[in-house]
Amino acid sequence: MTTSNKPSLEVCLSPALLHLYDVKNSIVVIIDVLRATSTICTALYNGATSVIPVATVEECVNIGRAIDGITAGERDGRVAEGLVHGNSPFEYPREFIENKTLVLTTTNGTKLLHMAKDAIQIVTGSFPNISAVCDYLAAQGQNVILGCAAWKDRVNMEDTLFAGAVISRIREHFEVGCDAAIAAETLYNTAKGDIYAYMQQASHYQRLAKYGLEKDIAYCLTPDGANVLPIFREGKLVPF
Amino acid sequence: MTTSNKPSLEVCLSPALLHLYDVKNSIVVIIDVLRATSTICTALYNGATSVIPVATVEECVNIGRAIDGITAGERDGRVAEGLVHGNSPFEYPREFIENKTLVLTTTNGTKLLHMAKDAIQIVTGSFPNISAVCDYLAAQGQNVILGCAAWKDRVNMEDTLFAGAVISRIREHFEVGCDAAIAAETLYNTAKGDIYAYMQQASHYQRLAKYGLEKDIAYCLTPDGANVLPIFREGKLVPF
């Protein structure tokens, strides 16, 4: 819209909309706040060597066996059959995960990650590593797409809020033109006074609260509890 | 999420997401605030017999000739070659449009309308007919999908705000579960104090303002200037 020479900062609210964006010329931030990308940064922050994101339980089992990794993933709120751990960031304290490789299967986040494979760079973001994400993006001088993993392609609240939080922190470095970005920022600014309370009306909150996971949700919505940047290199997420 | 027996009220932010919704068991409201659905209700309010929405300029010309209708549509901000009128609601005062048929080609709105053809019923909505839309939806007791026409499948601000405005008015009659609906309502509640000012940051505002169309935008954002409900019957939008 303007003639600024700043790189663009856009928000893609669902993987089903990613084809509308210029992925090849952008850094893509994969956002799956509840809970994949929160758990990924937590595992790396606590010393995991890498996190390997895979699409299926079968792949998870096979790769886990081949590299002696920790296999993790849930389906319908339970550890998936054949895997050993779940999606909660609290399952990965330093004394457990340090120097190990986590092989993690998640539906929404992994799908988006594979769709973004032609990006300049892929990183993952969530509130526990928001400062690391923002510092990195502001320093690169590249176009950015904040890619929400959503829920089975449906727009969700928590990923949108995180996108808005990032924009509110680093918008001065970018040209923020797309309406989804403006909407996300407005939502975040409206909710930020008590983001946990605002999230209680969201569909995923209710899904997880049913399983007693309010503590996970609170952690996943809190800034900088695991402030490291996972960056995608040769099929693995490693600390930047 | 709850066990209420109310019908559901959901928001689809882009035609590219419509396949995720249960169109067949819902009333679909086509929303293309700037300017197709604002112009449609205005033409009907001012006495047009019907509005025939068509996808292409060629179709528009052919149907217009066959039924002696008023052909209208723009491409890149100008009346499309071969057509006689544009997309502005101000082109359709009573003294011009009464007892005539408007054949209108629009890209985003028409596409969504055809995608929603299996719905229980299709109606169109915009701020100029918001009360008619809300009264109708509240009275039907059916599931509702508020379908944003968006901009070339990209989420846009004005259609999202209208969806939020509808939800804020009639949510008591429905189960509002989807996060897009909650987000739209929050956006509307944040913007409603001065929706015109809020819209000035939106991409479509800037696109239209470039053509000097601020007056159109103000009209399209103002409630109940043309408070009639266009309902889709046998290929035509007619007043309910």
Image (cartoon, coloured by chain):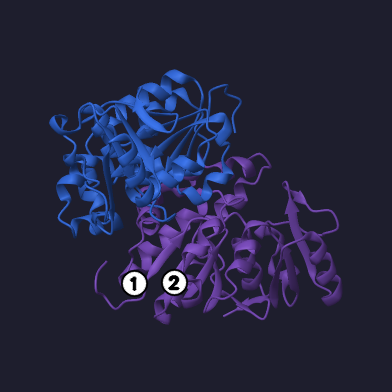
Chain colours: A purple, B blue
- Residue A37 in the image: state x and y as whole percent: 60, 63
Residue furthest to the top: B139
Q: Which mark is residue A174?
A: 1
Looking at numbered disc 1 in the image, what kind of residue is underneath it? Phe
Q: Is residue B55 above or below residue B100?
A: below
Q: Chain of mark 2?
A: A
User: Circle 1 marks a residue in which chain?
Assistant: A
Q: Is residue A197 visible?
A: no
At x 50%, y 39%, the residue is B116
SS at badge 1? loop
Q: At label 2, which amino acid type do we have? A: Val
The residue that disc 2 covers is A144
Q: Is residue B176 left or right of residue A101?
A: left
Of residue B141 and residue B29, the one placed in the foreground of this image is B29
At horizontal 72% and vertical 47% (from top left) the residue drawn is A77
Q: Is residue B162 left or right of residue A26?
A: left
Task: Report x, y in % for residue B123.
Answer: 40, 31
The numbered mark, 1 or 2, whose residue comes first in the sequence reads 2
Vertical side of A65 occupied by A181: above or below: above
Coordinates of residue B55 in the picture (x, y in percent): 40, 47
| For residue B141, above or below residue A114 | above
Q: Residues within 10 Å of mark 1 (few under 14, many from 20)?
A: many
Q: Quadrant of residue B40?
A: top left
Query: Is residue A182 visible from the viewing direction of this image?
Result: yes
Alpha-carbon distance for marks 1 and 2?
Answer: 9 Å
